[in-house]
Image: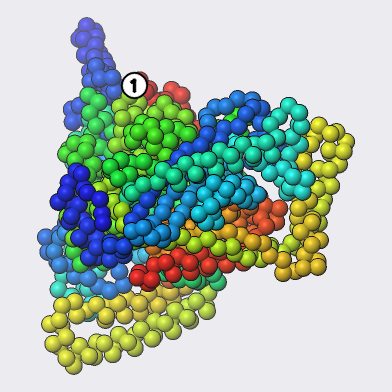
C-alpha cells in the first residue's frame, strides 16, 4: 500500500484515488519493496592517469572525491522473493566489462544467494577520472609511466573492492521503504554536432561561420527522478536521469566528479548528509554541457549570478530535482511492481569501408611514425594511434567474417509505473527518444554508459562524419542501434501489458 | 534702437538657449524627465489594451472555419514605446505584441488593406512625429484569435456564409485598438532604463517527426517502430528585456522564446493561449501592473505540443494542478505548466537585473525593405496543386449541394466544419497557380526587416514562421550579447531549410511556403548585415550602467 501522507492526508487520498482510477497501472496490493543504500569513496591515489582525452593527463591533485552510489532494491510477497535490482552510479568515464565482471564475482562470494547479473553499474562520464582499461590491445591506450603513477590495474582492484563492499552493505541494510517518481526539465546539455553547407558535421564545430547550417540533432532537456524513502518516510536516496554527460571540467589535470559533486552537495544540504544520489546519464552521445552558440549571453549570466559554469549546471539541475520533489513527495508507493530483466544482445559490428580503412591506416602510421621519431610523443599520440589501429584490425577481421557481432548487455527494470533501461554506449539522443516514444511506461529512464562506451551514432551522423560518428568512434552502427531500440522497447512493453 | 535690437537679440538668444536646453534634457512636457534624472534621454512607455471583439468572430489558424463560441480569456495588444535622444532626431520605436495568429502586411496581396498598415495609418494622425516604419507589430501566433483581413464576406474565405463578424470589420476594430495601445504607450513614456538577461524554459518542442525512411510529418506519431527522430533541434533559451522607471521600479518585461502560443489551438473560444496564464503568473509574482510583451523567436518547426513523453508530463500537471479539469497535451494543464516555466525563467533572472540597469543605452533602429528570392514553383507543382484543388472543388460542390438539399444541416452545431475545411484546401490548391503567375513577374519578394540595438542586445524581426535553423545561424554569428529574433512581424509563411524540404512535412511543401532555403539564407545574411551595421558602436553614445 501507499505510505502515509504526512503533510496533507486529504490531498494524498484524492490524488491516490484519481491516479488509480485514471491509470490503474500500479499494482496496489502485490509487493513489498525493500531498499538499501550505500556510498563508496572511489577516489584514486595520486598521481593517476586520467581518461577521456587523446592526450595523456596525469592528475596530481584531487579537486573533489569520486564516489560510487548504490541503491539495492528487492521486491517480496511476504517472505517470498520476487525480484531484485542493484544499481550503482559511478564517477567514471565508462565501465569496463572486466571490471563489472570482477565486481559481480566479488559480490557473489559474499552474497551467494543473489543473482549478480542483476547488478548494473553506470558511469557519469566525467573526463577527470582514472584510466581503467589500458591493455596492450586497447583501442584507446595511453603511455602511462610504470613507476611513478597509479596503474590502471591497481585502481581497478581498489574500485572493485570498494564497490563490491558497498553493494554488500546496501543489500544487507535494505529495509521496507517506498518510492516516488516524477519529471521536470533543465537546459543542461546542448547538441554538440554542427552541420555545414557541404553536409559535413563536426563535434564542437564553429557556429559563427557563414557555412554553418544547423545543429545535427535534438536537445533533450527532460530530467527524470526517482526518490527512495525509508519506512520512516525519510528520503534516503534519489536517482537523477538527465541526458547530459558530466564533462564540464573535462580538460583539467585533476580528479573531479564534475557537476555531480556539487549537485550531490547541494542536495545533501537540503535533504540530509547521508542522502545517496545516483547520477544517471540519458542518451547523450551527441550532447554535452558546452553551448556552441549564445556563449556570451551564458557567460554574462553566470558572471551576474557570481557562479562558475559548473555551479550554473548544478543550479539548473538541482532546481529541476527540487521541482519534482515538491510535486511528487506525497505520491509514494511501497508496493510497486519490480521486474528486472538483464539480457545480452547480439549486435552487428559496424562494417568498415575500404576508405575508412585507408584513412585509419594512414593515421595510425602517422602517429606511429611520430612516436618512433620521438618516444615522448607517445603521450600525445598513442591513444590516437591505437584508436586508428582498431579500425585497421576490424577491417582485416571482417574480411573473413562479414557478419561479425558484438555482445552488449542491457537491463530493463520496471519500478511501479516507470521503467529504467540501460545500454553500454554513448548513445545518440535519437535512439533514446525512439525508446521513450514507444515505451508504454509512464516515464522511461534511459541510462547510457553501463559499459565501457563507444559512440552509437545515427545514420545521419554517419553521413555527416566527424568525431563520434566515424568508424574509429563506433564499434556498432545505425543498424545495431535500431536493434538495440527494438529489443529494449519489446522488453519494456512486455513489462507493461496493461498499458498497451 | 540699437539697444532694443540688443535686447531682442538677448531675448531670442535666451529663448533659443532654453529650447536647446529643453531638447537636450528631454524636458518636453508629456515625456517628463528633468536634468536631475540620472536617466539621460531614454524614454520608455507602456500600454496594453484588450483587443477581444464583443461579437462572434471567425477564429483563425485551422483549415476549417471556426465561429467563436465565447471568450475563454481576453486577447490583448501590448505596446512598448522607446525614444532615445533629442527631438527632432531622436530614435523612436513602438513595438506591439498582439495575441493574433499573424500580422497581415500586404505580402499576400499588396492592394488590400492590412492590419499593419491600418495601425500605421491611424498613428499617422494621432502621432505624426512617428514614421510608419517605427511601428513594429508581432504576433504570438495564438490559433484562437480573430481572423483579420480585408475580406468582407466569409463566403469568399470559407465557401459558405457564416454568422460572424466579417474579417474586414474585425481587422478594423483590432487595428483601432492596437493603435490605441501604441498611442497610449507613446504618450505615457517617461525616463527609464533597461536591463537584459538570459533564462531557460522548456516550452517549444520540435514538432516534425521523421520516420526511418526520412519522411517527415508535422505532429507525426512518435510511438511507432518507424519513428526515427525529430527533424531539427530545439531552443529553450529565453531572452529577457526588463524595463524600469526612474525609481528603479520594474515596469515591464519583453519575453522572447522559440515557441508559438498554440497549446489549445483547436478551441472555438477566443484565447491568448499560454500567454494568458503566463501573464497572470508573472504579475502574481512581480506585480499586477507589470507589462508583459511576448515575442516568438524563430519557431516555424517548434510548438508547445508534447511529441514524446506525454504521459509523464500529464501526470505532473495533474499533481501540480489538482483542480484542473483537463491535463495533458493541448490542455489548460499544459498552459499552466508552461506559464510556471516561463515565470520561473523571468523571476530567476530578475534578481540580477536591478543592479544592472542601463539608463542611457545606445539605441538605434534600422528598417529595410529587402527582396528575397521566392521559392519558385514549377509547372509540375502547379499542375499537382490544381489537380488537388479540382478534387476538393468537387467535394466542396457536393457538400454545398447537400446543404442546399437539406438546409436542416445548418441547425447542427458547427455544421460548417467539413465544408469549410474542403473549401480552404481547394483555395490552397488553386493559390499555387496564382503564385506561379506572380513569380513570373516578381521572382523576388519584398519584406520588411527591423533591427534594433538596445545597449548590448539586438532585436531582429522577420515576417515568417521561421524555422529554428535560420534562427541559430543568425544567433551563431551575431555580435550582440543577446539576439532577440522576432518572427511573425508580418503575414507569415513557413520558411523551411533544405533538410525540412527533403522531409516533406506540412510546413515545407510549396503550398505552405513563399520562400525556400535560398531566400532563407538571404534573410540570414541580410539580417546579419543589418545587425553588424547597428553594432558599429558609437562610443559617444555608449550607455551608462547603474552599478
What chain letter is assigned to the residue under label 1?
B
Q: Residues within 10 Å of mark 1 (few under 14, many from 20)?
A: some
> At 18% from the left edge and 31% from the top edge, which residue is drawn?
B30
- The x, y position of residue A314, in whole percent, is 43, 36
What sort of colour scheme is used for the picture? rainbow
**Location of the C terminus of chain B (image quadrant):** top left
Query: Is B507 on the left or on the right of A5, as rendered?
Result: right
Which of B136/A463 is in front?
A: A463
Where's residue A103, x and y in %?
59, 46
Q: Which image quarter: residue B445?
A: bottom left
In this rendering, would B338 be left or right of B232?
left
Let me know if residue B454 appears in the view. Answer: no
A319 and A335: which is toward the camera: A335
Where in the figure is residue B374, as x and y percent of width and height? Answer: 49, 63
Q: Quadrant of the N terminus of chain B?
A: top left
The residue to which callout 1 is attached is B546
Q: In screen coordinates, is B10 left or right of B358? A: left
Q: Residue at x 66, y 55 (%)?
A: A474
Q: Is residue B312 above or below residue B2?
A: below
Amino acid at each position: 500500500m501507499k505510505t502515509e501522507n504526512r503533510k496533507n492526508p486529504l490531498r494524498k487520498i484524492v490524488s491516490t484515488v484519481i491516479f488509480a482510477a485514471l491509470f490503474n497501472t500500479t499494482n496496489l496490493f502485490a509487493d513489498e519493496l525493500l531498499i538499501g543504500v550505500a556510498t563508496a569513496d572511489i577516489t584514486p591515489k595520486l598521481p593517476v592517469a586520467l581518461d577521456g582525452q587523446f592526450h595523456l593527463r596525469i592528475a596530481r591533485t584531487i579537486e573533489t572525491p569520486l564516489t560510487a552510489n548504490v541503491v539495492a532494491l528487492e521486491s517480496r510477497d511476504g517472505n517470498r522473493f520476487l525480484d531484485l535490482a542493484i544499481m550503482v552510479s559511478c564517477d567514471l568515464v565508462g565501465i569496463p566489462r572486466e571490471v563489472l565482471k570482477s565486481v559481480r564475482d566479488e559480490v557473489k562470494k559474499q552474497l551467494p544467494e543473489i543473482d549478480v547479473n542483476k547488478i548494473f553499474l553506470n558511469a557519469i562520464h566525467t573526463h577527470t577520472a582514472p584510466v581503467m582499461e589500458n591493455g596492450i590491445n586497447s583501442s584507446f591506450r595511453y603511455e602511462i609511466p610504470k613507476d611513478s603513477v597509479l596503474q590502471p590495474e591497481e585502481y581497478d582492484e581498489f574500485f572493485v573492492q570498494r564497490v563490491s563492499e558497498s553493494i554488500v552493505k546496501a543489500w544487507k541494510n535494505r529495509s521496507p521503504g517506498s518510492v516516488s517518481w516524477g519529471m521536470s526539465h533543465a537546459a543542461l546539455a546542448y547538441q554538440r554536432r554542427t552541420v555545414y553547407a557541404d553536409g559535413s558535421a563536426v563535434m564542437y564545430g564553429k557556429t559563427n561561420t557563414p557555412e554553418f547550417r544547423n545543429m545535427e540533432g535534438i536537445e533533450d532537456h527532460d530530467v527524470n527522478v526517482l526518490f527512495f524513502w525509508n519506512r520512516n518516510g525519510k528520503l534516503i536516496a534519489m536517482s537523477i536521469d538527465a541526458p547530459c554527460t558530466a564533462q564540464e571540467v573535462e580538460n583539467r589535470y585533476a580528479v573531479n566528479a564534475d557537476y555531480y559533486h556539487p549537485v550531490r552537495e547541494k542536495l545533501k544540504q537540503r535533504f540530509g548528509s547521508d542522502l545517496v544520489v545516483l547520477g544517471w546519464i540519458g542518451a547523450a552521445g551527441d550532447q554535452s554541457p558546452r553551448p556552441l552558440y549564445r556563449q556570451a549571453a551564458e557567460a554574462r549570466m553566470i558572471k551576474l549570478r557570481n557562479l562558475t559554469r559548473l555551479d550554473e549546471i548544478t543550479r539548473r539541475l538541482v532546481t529541476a530535482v527540487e521541482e519534482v520533489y515538491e510535486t511528487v513527495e506525497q505520491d509514494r508507493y511501497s508496493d510497486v511492481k519490480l521486474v528486472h530483466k538483464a539480457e545480452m544482445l547480439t549486435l552487428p559490428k559496424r562494417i568498415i569501408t575500404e576508405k575508412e580503412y585507408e584513412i585509419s591506416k594512414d593515421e595510425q602510421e602517422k602517429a606511429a611514425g611520430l612516436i618512433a621519431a620521438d618516444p615522448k610523443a607517445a603521450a600525445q599520440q598513442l591513444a590516437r594511434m591505437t584508436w586508428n589501429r582498431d579500425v585497421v584490425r576490424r577491417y582485416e577481421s571482417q574480411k573473413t567474417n562479414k557478419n561479425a557481432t558484438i555482445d552488449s548487455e542491457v537491463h530493463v527494470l520496471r519500478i511501479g509505473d516507470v521503467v529504467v533501461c540501460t545500454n553500454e554506449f554513448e548513445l545518440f539522443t535519437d535512439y533514446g527518444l525512439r525508446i521513450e516514444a514507444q515505451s508504454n511506461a509512464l516515464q522511461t529512464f534511459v541510462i547510457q554508459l553501463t559499459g565501457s562506451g563507444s559512440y552509437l551514432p545515427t545514420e545521419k551522423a554517419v553521413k555527416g562524419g566527424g568525431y563520434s560518428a566515424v568508424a574509429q568512434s563506433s564499434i556498432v552502427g545505425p543498424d545495431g542501434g535500431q536493434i538495440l531500440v527494438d529489443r529494449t522497447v519489446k522488453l519494456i512493453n512486455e513489462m507493461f501489458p496493461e498499458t498497451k | 534702437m540699437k539697444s532694443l535690437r540688443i535686447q531682442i537679440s538677448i531675448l531670442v538668444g535666451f529663448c533659443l538657449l532654453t529650447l536647446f536646453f529643453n531638447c537636450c534634457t528631454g524636458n518636453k512636457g508629456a515625456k517628463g524627465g528633468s536634468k536631475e534624472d540620472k536617466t539621460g534621454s531614454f524614454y520608455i512607455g507602456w500600454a496594453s489594451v484588450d483587443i477581444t471583439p464583443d461579437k462572434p468572430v471567425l477564429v483563425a489558424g485551422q483549415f476549417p472555419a471556426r465561429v467563436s463560441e465565447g471568450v475563454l480569456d481576453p486577447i490583448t495588444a501590448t505596446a512598448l514605446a522607446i525614444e532615445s535622444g533629442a527631438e527632432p532626431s531622436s530614435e523612436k520605436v513602438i513595438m506591439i505584441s498582439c495575441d493574433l495568429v499573424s500580422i497581415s502586411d500586404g505580402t499576400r496581396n499588396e492592394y488590400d488593406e492590412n492590419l499593419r498598415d491600418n495601425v500605421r495609418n491611424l498613428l499617422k494622425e494621432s502621432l505624426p512625429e512617428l514614421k510608419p516604419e517605427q511601428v513594429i507589430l508581432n504576433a504570438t501566433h495564438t490559433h484562437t484569435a480573430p481572423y483579420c483581413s480585408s475580406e468582407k464576406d466569409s463566403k469568399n474565405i470559407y465557401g459558405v456564409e457564416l454568422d460572424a463578424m466579417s474579417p474586414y470589420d474585425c481587422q478594423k476594430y483590432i487595428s483601432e485598438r492596437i493603435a490605441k495601445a501604441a498611442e497610449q504607450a507613446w504618450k505615457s513614456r517617461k525616463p527609464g532604463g533597461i536591463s537584459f538577461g538570459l533564462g531557460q524554459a522548456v516550452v517549444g518542442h520540435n514538432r516534425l517527426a521523421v520516420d526511418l525512411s526520412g519522411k517527415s510529418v508535422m505532429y507525426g506519431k512518435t510511438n511507432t517502430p518507424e519513428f526515427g527522430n525529430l527533424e531539427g533541434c530545439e531552443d529553450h533559451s529565453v531572452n529577457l528585456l526588463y524595463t524600469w522607471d526612474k525609481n528603479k521600479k520594474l515596469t515591464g518585461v519583453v519575453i522572447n522564446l522559440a515557441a508559438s502560443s498554440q497549446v489549445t489551438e483547436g478551441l472555438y473560444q477566443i484565447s491568448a493561449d499560454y500567454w494568458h496564464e503566463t501573464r497572470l503568473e508573472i504579475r502574481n509574482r512581480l506585480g499586477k501592473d507589470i507589462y508583459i510583451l511576448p515575442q516568438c523567436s524563430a519557431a516555424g518547426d517548434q510548438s508547445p505540443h508534447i511529441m514524446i513523453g506525454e504521459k509523464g508530463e500529464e501526470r505532473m500537471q495533474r499533481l501540480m494542478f489538482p483542480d484542473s479539469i483537463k491535463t495533458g497535451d493541448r490542455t489548460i494543464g499544459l498552459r499552466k505548466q508552461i506559464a510556471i516555466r516561463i515565470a520561473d525563467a523571468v523571476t530567476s533572472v530578475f534578481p540580477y537585473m536591478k543592479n544592472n540597469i542601463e539608463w542611457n543605452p545606445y539605441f538605434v533602429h534600422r528598417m529595410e525593405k529587402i527582396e528575397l528570392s521566392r521559392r519558385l514553383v514549377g509547372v509540375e507543382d502547379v499542375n499537382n496543386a490544381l489537380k488537388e484543388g479540382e478534387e476538393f472543388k468537387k467535394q466542396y460542390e457536393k457538400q454545398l449541394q447537400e446543404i442546399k438539399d437539406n438546409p436542416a444541416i445548418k441547425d447542427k452545431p458547427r455544421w460548417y466544419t467539413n465544408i469549410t475545411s474542403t473549401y480552404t484546401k481547394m483555395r490552397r490548391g488553386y493559390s499555387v497557380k496564382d503564385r506561379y503567375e506572380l513569380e513570373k513577374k516578381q521572382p523576388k519578394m519584398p519584406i520588411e526587416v527591423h533591427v534594433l540595438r538596445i545597449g548590448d542586445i539586438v532585436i531582429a524581426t522577420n515576417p515568417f514562421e521561421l524555422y529554428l535553423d535560420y534562427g541559430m545561424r543568425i544567433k551563431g554569428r551575431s555580435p550582440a550579447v543577446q539576439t532577440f529574433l522576432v518572427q511573425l512581424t508580418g503575414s507569415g509563411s513557413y520558411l523551411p531549410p533544405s533538410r525540412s524540404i527533403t522531409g516533406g512535412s506540412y510546413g515545407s511543401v510549396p503550398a505552405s511556403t513563399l520562400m525556400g532555403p535560398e531566400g532563407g539564407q538571404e534573410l540570414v545574411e541580410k539580417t546579419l548585415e543589418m545587425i553588424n551595421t547597428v553594432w558599429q558602436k558609437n562610443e559617444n553614445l555608449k550607455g551608462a550602467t547603474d552599478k
